[in-house]
Amino acid sequence: MSYQVTIQPSGHKFTVEAGQTVLSAALDAGFALPYGCRNGACGACKGKILEGQVDYGDIQPGSLSDEDRHRGLALFCSAKPKSDLVLEVKEVGAAKDIPVKTLPCRIERMERLSHDVMQLFLKLPANERLQFLPGQYIDFLLKDGKRRSFSLANAPEEDALLELHVRHVAGGEFTEHVFNAMQVKDIMRINGPLGSFFLRESDKPAIFLATGTGFAPIKSILNHAFHHEADRPLVLYWGARTLQDMYMAELAGQWQQIHGNFTFIPVLSQAGTDWPGRTGYVQDAVLADFANLAGYQVYACGAPAMVDAARKACLGHGLPEDEFFSDAFAFQTT
């Protein structure tokens, strides 16, 4: 059996299947309700039931009082409908709606994706989850007070572990540590989510430009879009020196085979003579394909020089200034 849930004041509606929690169904339907731990501990997903009945589920002591229940409140990460529902809850509409947290984490897995890119998977404490918008980043808080920023590469739906792509930077104190000293089970502290690089709601086609590990937040954005079966045209231009530097090209190629609205265009700046694809700078490839960008959105992430050049070039080809979104990766060295 399934039940229909209506969110007020937005009027959004979604269906909850038998055995599914309200929060899980809302996120699956593409509606971002606030949450923290997703297991009945923190109370961040608390909201009011205006109409209908729920099974309150497994909640931890102190997270939902008898007075809360009397006032019609429930924890949506645990509550399961017993009838159609009308809920009062403020949906997450922008980065400002998501609380920034400082949390401990454990290095759960480390995998080399290429000679200079390490994939890190971070495990948060059992009672914590990090709500974020796809495309945002976190900071590692280091013992000397410094911070190092890395984009989240996993989609919000896949939040059991946080995924980062760390590029080795010569002379970079933190990346040297990642590649030469960091070990599984190491404990770190993070702060986030941070940043305003996320996909805006629109019917316009979206063009993504990435260099290097600028692919990480775009991976998060695209996986989230695919999860929710977005039908707007999406095209990714990923620039690298050589094909070996394009460390997840196979994944992007698989997306193109599966999703009819997605196109992947790799662009190599130092391609050999046997490379049959596009060459040069990634922003130049975009301009060669789109003479007028007036009806598009552009998302650029990677080296600051690319982001700056892409912004100037795209605005010069008709892109409205408020439809260019970017995240420039500035590397810090000792």
Image (cartoon, grey):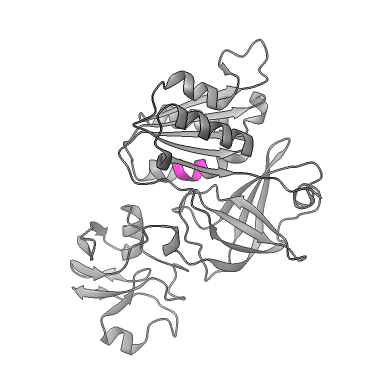
Is residue 51 at all visible to an observer of this figure? yes
Q: Which residues are magenta?
A: 218-222
Residue 243 percent across, percent down from the top left: 64, 24
- Relative to residue 183, is residue 237 depicted above or below? above
Check the image and name the residue furthest to the front: 316
Residue 16 percent across, percent down from the top left: 26, 60
Q: Main secondary structure of the magenta part?
A: helix
Rendering quarter of residue 51: bottom left
Left or right: where does residue 186 sit relative to residue 284? right
Is residue 212 at all visible to an observer of this figure? no
Residue 219 belongs to magenta span = yes
Say how many tags the image has.
Answer: 0
Tell which of 57 and 134 is nearer to you.
134
Tell which of 304 and 32 is nearer to you.
304
The residue sitting at 39% across, 66% down in the picture is 34
- Relative to residue 303, is residue 58 depicted above or below? below
The residue sitting at 38% across, 82% down in the picture is 64
